[in-house]
Image (cartoon, rainbow, N blue to C red):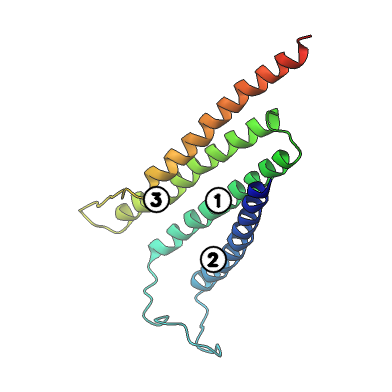
Amino acid sequence: MKKLSTLKLIIDILYISAIIGLIVFLGFYLVVLFGWDLSDLPFKLKDYNNLSLSQNLYIIYPFLFLALLVYILVLKNFKKIIELFYQGKFFEFKTVKLLREIGLHFLISVFLMVMPSIITPFLSNTTVVKFSLPIGFDSSFFLIAIGLFFMALSEIFNKAFKINQENELTI
């Protein structure tokens, strides 16, 4: 249970920091959207005056905001799974459902993060469309693999749930 409580602490810290990040991101987007002047702040933002705000920024930020919101949903569902594990409810239908939702949310977040890189070249009047998908721990392929892993894990837990139900009915 010590490992589970450590995992719960890590997920709680990530969840709170993601919510704070979402609020900061929303604040920055509102500043960009409404064009507020930040020169009166008591502190200086590095290179704020050199920031070129193109029309593409208005399209990219909502996708990134939604992707961050989906990550918060992933963390929230993961917190629920840990609570179920604390209660000893490993092979429950709710666990299967939450694991499937986490996998689906990972796939949705990849879609939301890749869409701006697909849409932006068509809006910027360029003839060359540059599209790259790097391979690494922060790449889209890795997140797709994580999403598919959680969906496969939900199927494994679903089979274990069915076996557990049959086992409880057996005398």
Q: Secondary structure at mark 1?
A: helix
Q: Secondary structure at mark 3?
A: loop
Horizontal side, residue 123 vs residue 12: left or right? left
Q: CA separation, marks 3 and 1?
A: 16 Å
Q: Position of residue 78 (x, y in %)?
A: 63, 45
Name the quadrant of the C terminus. Answer: top right
Q: Say whether disc 1 or disc 2 marks the residue closer to the N-terminus.
A: 2
- Circles 3 and 2: CB distance less than 8 Å? no
Q: Nearer the viewer, mark 3 or mark 1?
A: 3
Q: Residue at x 64, y 37 (%)?
A: 98
Tag shown at residue 137: 3
Q: Which residue is mark 1?
A: 71
Q: Position of residue 101 (x, y in %)?
A: 59, 37
Q: Nearer the viewer, residue 58 or 116?
A: 116
Q: Residue at x 51, y 29 (%)?
A: 152
Q: CA separation, marks 1 and 2?
A: 14 Å
Tag shown at residue 25: 2
Horizontal side, residue 148 vs residue 71: left or right? left
Q: Quadrant of residue 160?
A: top right
In this view, 171 is above or below 93: above
Q: Nearer the viewer, residue 166 or 116?
A: 166
Q: Secondary structure at mark 2?
A: helix
Amino acid of disc 2: Phe
Q: CA separation, marks 3 and 2?
A: 23 Å
Amino acid of disc 1: Tyr
Q: Position of residue 38 (x, y in %)?
A: 51, 83
Amino acid of disc 3: Phe
